[in-house]
Amino acid sequence: MSAETLEFQVEARQLLQLVIHSIYSNKDVFLRELISNASDALDKLRLAALRDDSLGADVSDLHIELAADTGARTLTVRDNGIGMSHDEVIQLIGTIANSGTAQFVQELKEAKDASAAETLIGQFGVGFYSSFMVADEVVLVTRKAGEEHGTRWTSSGAGTYTLEAVPDAPQGTAVTLKLRPTDTDDQLHDYTAAWKIREIVKKYSDFITWPIRLVGEEEPADGGTPAPVNSMKALWARSRDEVTDAEYHELYKHISHDWRDPLEVVRLQAEGTFEYQALLFVPAHAPHDLYTQGYQRGVQLYVKRVFVMDDCEALMPPYLRFVKGVVDAADLSLNVSREILQQDRQIQLMRRRLAKKILSTVKDLRTGEPEKYATLWREFGRVVKEGLLSDSENRDAILAAASFASTRDAEEQTGLKQYVERMKEGQQHIYYLTGESRQAVDNSPHLEAFRAKGVEVLLLTDPVDELWVEAVPEFEGKQLRSVAKGELDLDTEPDQEQQEDREQRKQEFAGLLGWMTEQLGEEVKEVRLSTRLTVSPACVVSDTHDATPALEAMYRAMGQELPRAKRILELNPGHPLVVGLHRAHTDRPADEAVAETAELLYGMALLAEGGQPAEPSRFLKLMANRLQHNL
């Protein structure tokens, strides 16, 4: 094959330019990224050789080599791992296959400082491109295990790259950087210096489980292979006092491709009939693709310190998909498939234990380190609440760890336990209101009576809230109840005078209520007097067991059409507009203007809760006519 020149995908080209123009403050990390890629390639080859005897790959001495040439100013990172085919080089290097690429590039351009940019590009995981921070040209030579021919990829990062066949390429991948001149002011060090290479490896890649050899130095006297630069010690197998926070943080960055330190480190050691060790990390920031369908979740699985699987989904429930880390089991087969893991009883027990450990850690952070907890819940609370639907076994633990906005404080969130402790005497329920935003629910007419009587209401504005409140019947014996559903009466024991007053008003307004129910019959199932309104003239509520409009819309978006439930219109009998409408209906029951006013009142109630009339243009026309008539 003669050399062919191809263009980078548009987004890849934009990323290259951002990287080349020094969005990183610390350029040393390019070597960490290349070593991490090499380590992944070795892991994949060892697994492939286990599962396919016909592969014919030599796995007797899997390792990573670092070769520097001071005169030519080149640095080569070489592995004898799985390698890449011609098509894989195009797919993995020339294209960034991710649905969030365009959004990511835009966020990167808008990043206000270098640290914000580092965080973003770290989330996206484009470590190979970091080579162009320190190199004028990058040459990659690779041959996939089991194939005869290799491929050479060459680029200066200017928007194009060339590909050509290499008949005699060794198995694996070699990345050679033609380094830029040293410039300490721009953090460009001499990356051909052995002491600098050792310093970077020791700092960032000491825990890599494969030997990293620095070639070109004085050879061993016995003619053997050079001693590895890294210790290759599994951090999860060492006691806590033997490992520094910095070492944990570097392992997290290696696993997650994140550039930030983790928010929390979680260790777990299980002994007995089934032994395993776990070292888990809670990130400090949610990745941009956390809610996309293709998000890679799961932790790394090792068996007796031998890597078996990346992103092992069976070990972590979907609602904890943001957790990264390593689980090292003592009694599993090395040649295990994802399908077998899903059914393995030991894996299921591990998954349950790991989930409980993470949830207990979240709960402990809440009481012990509230600032860390606030960050965790802000970034991942919406995901954790998904577990209220999928993990009934841990439902109480999730509720105990959760926080919610409430009418008690505009800034500070509350837990359900604290809510229950503050409940007013005689209060039987935990009240909540769902909606699209804090502003929308804060201004809802459904809250008026609760504010007037000082009763706290939880304000739930995440989409998942619409679902889990239907699945969680109670907390500590107190039922959860929506303030926008069913009939509510905060006077649990009204005195005789109040009772008589209500009966009198019911009789007094009976004619208007019956007439409006008939007039609005296509839209509402009933019009009744309200006990929840103190300021607004009207509000719309759902029946106790009906789905809310937001929930109906959510199911429609998922392709599941729910039968449309008619709502209930509640009127405030003390509001001047309702009093006036009652009087007008009594005096002029056949007047078209009275019917139009009733329709407008219903439309206003829909708007007040964030909805809209079925025919907005008709509503506006009626409103304009009424305003014109009153001028």
Image (cartoon, grey):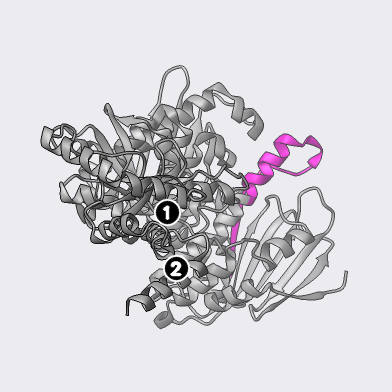
Occupied quadrant, residue 603 = bottom left
Is 56 contained in the magenta span? yes
Q: Residue at x 59, y 76 (%)?
A: 14
Residue 117 picture location, percent across and down: 44, 71
State the count of labels: 2
In the image, is 289 to the left or to the right of 138?
left
Q: Which mark is residue 13?
A: none
The quarter of the image holding the C terminus is bottom left
The residue shown at (54%, 37%) is 301
Residue 207 coordinates in the image, percent (x, y)? 46, 48
The residue that label 2 is drawn on is 118
Q: Amino acid at mark 2?
A: Glu
Residue 498 appears in view: yes
Q: Mark 2 or mark 1: name the one nearer the start of the chain.
A: 2
Q: Nearer the viewer, residue 594 or 605?
A: 594
Report x, y in % for residue 467.
45, 41
Task: Name the front one of labels 2 and 1.
Answer: 2
Which part of the image, by quadrant, shows the N terminus? Answer: bottom right
Question: Which residue is nearer to you in this view: 398 or 214?
Answer: 398
Tell me, yes or no, whether the highlighted magenta stretch contains residue 157. no
Gap in Å between the C-alphas at discs 2 and 1? Answer: 15 Å
Name the residue furthest right: 1
Report crowding for label 1: few under 14, some 14 to 19, many 20 or more residues within 10 A (C-alpha). many
Residues 231 and 145: in front is 145
Q: What secondary structure is marked by label 1?
A: helix
Rendering quarter of residue 471: top left
| Boundaries of the magenta span | 41-68
SS state under label 2: helix
Residue that label 1 marks: 250
Q: Residue at x 52, y 59 (%)?
A: 614
At label 1, the amino acid type is: Glu
x, y (%) of residue 311?
Answer: 56, 43
